Amino acid sequence: MPGTLYVIGVGPGDPELLTLKAAKVLREVTCICVPKGREEGSSLALSIVKKAVDLDGKEIIEAYFPMRKTTKQKPAHRSRSTEKEGSGSASCELDAKWNETAETVMSILAGGIDMAFITIGDPTIYSTFFYLYDRLLELNPGLAVEIIPGVSSINASAARAEISLGLADEKVAIVPATYADSLKGVLEAFDTVVLMKVHKVLDRIIQALDVARLTEKAVYISRAGMSDERIIRNIREVKESDLNYFSIVIVRK
């Protein structure tokens, strides 16, 4: 009987935010798949798990995926991701990496071995796992998969900054920072706006907030729950050294 693939959100960085169910499954499985953005780099997800669960004797499979923006095509069936930016050899490289990992995962599961795929935050919020999921379902539509939710960086950032994301009938928007140049409508329509991964476009975000007269309502949170966490309530005071890939701006009217 084929094994089960457990997709586990390990939270934003603090190992104490790993859920009881996630820790239980990670102790039980013998094989863990770890996604990485760089071949020579380390995995933040794995470093979190190591602080909470003894991994001695477990097989660790490192899956390297180039960090490029992708989106999924949506034909009648779930399908492969395609590049939003770039094409040609870069797209082929990314596709090959996903296919290689899918085949490795399927071969392990086919041997009746349960395995875990770990991901930062929550697997259902801007997670690369679903690109792999598409390929796995192509190989085996009946694949046994259980997704175990984790604390997202959104929740962790709001909690650390002591901000309510929404009350009563208030509307909340979660927006990638790539929309920095078209925030006007979002800022007007929603009571709370969460901007993800703002480190490369913070100046443009501040410009949009200035136009909307909401700059004083914005809080910058970087690496929420980690030892080098930064919470800056005056967004104009954010320095270049404060900018980080794991960064969020929360605008609360």
Image (cartoon, rainbow, N blue to C red):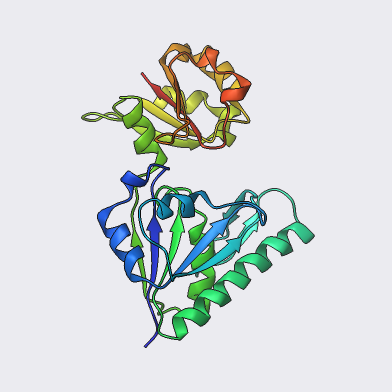
Q: Is residue 217 left or right of residue 200?
A: left
Q: Which of the two residues, 5 or 27, is positioned nearer the viewer here?
A: 27
Can the viewer see residue 123 in this picture? no
Q: Which of the two residues, 62 or 206, is positioned nearer the viewer here?
A: 62
Question: Residue 199 location in percent, x, y?
Answer: 59, 30
Relative to 22, is 188 above or below? above
> What residue is at 41 percent from the left and 73 percent from the top?
30
Q: Residue furthest right?
A: 89
Q: Is residue 64 left or right of residue 118?
A: right
* Quadrant occupied by the C terminus: top left
Relative to 29, is 121 above or below? above
Q: Residue furthest front?
A: 56
Question: Residue 250 location in percent, x, y?
Answer: 42, 26
Q: Which of the two residues, 171 or 95, is positioned nearer the viewer here?
A: 95
> What residue is at 58 percent from the left and 55 percent from the top?
36
Q: Residue furthest left?
A: 168
Q: Residue furthest bottom?
A: 1
Can the viewer see residue 62 in this picture? yes
